[in-house]
Amino acid sequence: MRVSNVTVRKRLVTVLFAGFLIFFIIDIRLGYVQLLIGDQLTTLAKDLWSRNIPFEPMRGEILDRNGEKLATNVSAPTVYIIPRQIEDPNEAATELASVLNMSVEKAYQYVTKQAMSVRIKEGRKISNEKAEEVRALGLAGVYIAEDNERYYPYGSFLSHVLGFTGIDNQGLAGLELYYEEKLKGERGYVQFYSDAKGHRLEGEGEEYTPPVDGLNLKLTVDIDIQKIVERELDNAVAQYNPDGAIAIAMNPNNGEILAMSSRPDFDPAEYQEVDPQVYNRNLPIWSAYEPGSTFKIITLAAALEEGKVDLEKETFDDPGHATVAGAKLRCWKKGGHGHQTFLEVVQNSCNPGFVELGERLGTSTLFSYIKKFGFGEKTGIDLQGEGKGILFAEKNVGPVELATTAFGQGVSVTPIQQVAAVSAAVNGGILYTPYIAKEWIDPLTGETASATTPTAKRRVISEETSKEIRYALESVVAQGTGKGAFVDGYRVGGKTGTAQKAVNGAYLENNHIVSFIGFAPADDPQIVVYVAVDNPKGTVQFGGVVAAPIVGNIIEDSLRHMEVEPREEQIEKEYTWLDTKLVEVPNIIGLTKQELNQQLVNLQVEISGEGNTVIDQSPSPGEKVKEGSKVRVFVGDEQEDS
């Protein structure tokens, strides 16, 4: 059958059109691949060829308020292997095993593993000296990656606050966890290219992406005040063998935490060796217990603000107990304090007197002040694990509950709540949010990236009421139950606390948390210090006996460090036969050795130097020290007038 020319031409046109269409589609596809997604495909291909050796960033350092390093980093390189680049697995395994102290069999598993890259566990975070030994082997396929690990120069100091990091430098507790995102930084790496067999591709160089270091964190903490606190807690543990101890120091005028510590503590570098219950519980913000008489400050503040009491004009008779709704609530002093002013009620920490104040206020008013002072809610401090305590629901508060709440029993509060509340009571009446992160600093430029602004939550009481509270609490230290915290020249105010511990709804016998909260100077408070000692042994369990002297020591040394000048118009201390009296150091410069004993009858003398005449002394003339204290004198030859 003969095909016509017309049909042939049609078929040729169809074939040509189809061919043109196919080539047009191919051209469009090639253009799309070359021009639009070429770079993307190249990147994907390079990703398949690339091998990355990571470079860890430097985790942001944690500094005290003066720039002292509290948590920093030390170099700790890590060994990586590209198995397909290993030329002789047996030789490589033998040499690596000898340097990294592992079995040859284990090393052989690493160098023959079917993976693009392998991190050797035994070669992780090694010393720089050990890393140099690995480099000296000259093994192809074995790489040293820059890495670092956390270092805490002060060991257990501030351990619960700082927390710690894991093997990957990730924050696991404390500030390390709370501010993980800002501290951790971003990983960098060295990238090179290899074929499917792991051999480096010719003509392809290495690409280096530097790590981005984390921001440095400057705290409100003063390491010198922290040292004072740590020293005093160590002394308390050695003397009383307590079940635990807590200390917080805060600036009452802005909420800055100056120091915080508790016992038992731990070394962040050795956290694996510690019971998790120790490092997971930052007691100053986590623990909740009955505050005892330190809570009376809140009742006092409410009564003064509401005009329910005149401390110096009104009196109260204490028979040793108060009867409320058939319940007999006893004073700590058997037989009571008798007839006293309400200022003496505060000085003597008289429970029945505070029951009276609670009744004058009533449930609604007292509990409104308790809540205004921040109890029953978290303070908002920038640390993990904060508790909020437990308060009675107002609908469940009867006469007995009102009475016990007024003197600090039957409610549960945290130490940080008490510090924040008492700070508001003495700073002029403003409740601040406690905080510990002061500034974030760029590690490269040293410039401040951001800073924390103090947060004033609300006014709780008036400035006039706050002034009355400061005076009343200063009298507690000078003439009442807080004499152990008295510091000559610094006008310390404060309140003792002795709280029974409850277990399964029943109070324990001879097992108390004794506490003291103090502030100074009373005319212009610069520091508030709270100390609680859990079940001190071998002593009378009273806050005034155990905790008050600790707070006095912390306040005295801290104010000297802060260069706060001594005050005048201090309330004179009322001594008892148990107290060691203060004596004024005389001016002995110019006296001879023979004349010293006549001048320093109540003091010990320590002489140094050569000569017969006193040319210098410490303490300085006019300072007051405890009887029997040591006076250091330096002697030399008396200078003759020329």
Image: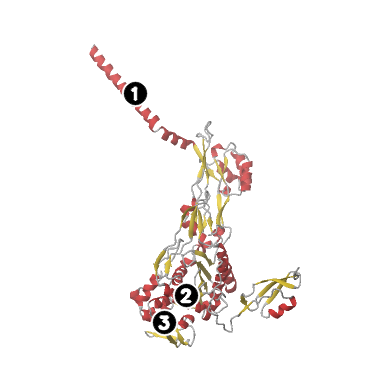
Element type where label 2 sits in the image: helix
Q: CA distance from mark 3 to mark 1?
A: 103 Å
Indicate how the structure is coloured in the image: secondary structure
Element type where label 3 sits in the image: loop
Task: Let me know if residue 500 appears in the view.
Answer: no
Q: Is residue 308 left or right of residue 73?
A: left
Tell me which amino acid carries mark 1: Phe
Q: Badges 2 and 1: C-beta atoms under 8 Å apart? A: no
Q: Quadrant of residue 33?
A: top left
Front: mark 3 or 1: 3
Q: Counting residues from the N terminus, which is met first, the one under dot 3 or under dot 1?
A: 1
Q: Which residue is mark 1?
A: 23
Q: CA distance from mark 2 to mark 3?
A: 15 Å
Front: mark 2 or 1: 2
Q: Position of residue 564 (x, y in %)?
A: 55, 68
Task: Let me know if residue 577 appears in the view.
Answer: yes
Tell me which amino acid carries mark 2: Arg
Q: Is residue 138 above or below residue 410?
A: above
Q: Position of residue 505 (x, y in %)?
A: 43, 75
Of residues 83 and 80, the one drawn nearer to the viewer in this rendering: 80
Label placed on residue 310: 3
Of residues 175 and 599, the one drawn nearer to the viewer in this rendering: 599
**Residue at 52% across / 68% down in the picture?**
247
Tell me which amino acid carries mark 3: Asp
Q: Which residue is mark 2?
A: 470
How would you rate the neighbour count of disc 2 (Cα within 10 Å): few for under 14, some for 14-19, many for 20 or more?
Answer: many
How would you rate the neighbour count of disc 1 (Cα within 10 Å): few for under 14, some for 14-19, many for 20 or more?
Answer: few
Q: Is residue 504 above or below residue 379?
A: below
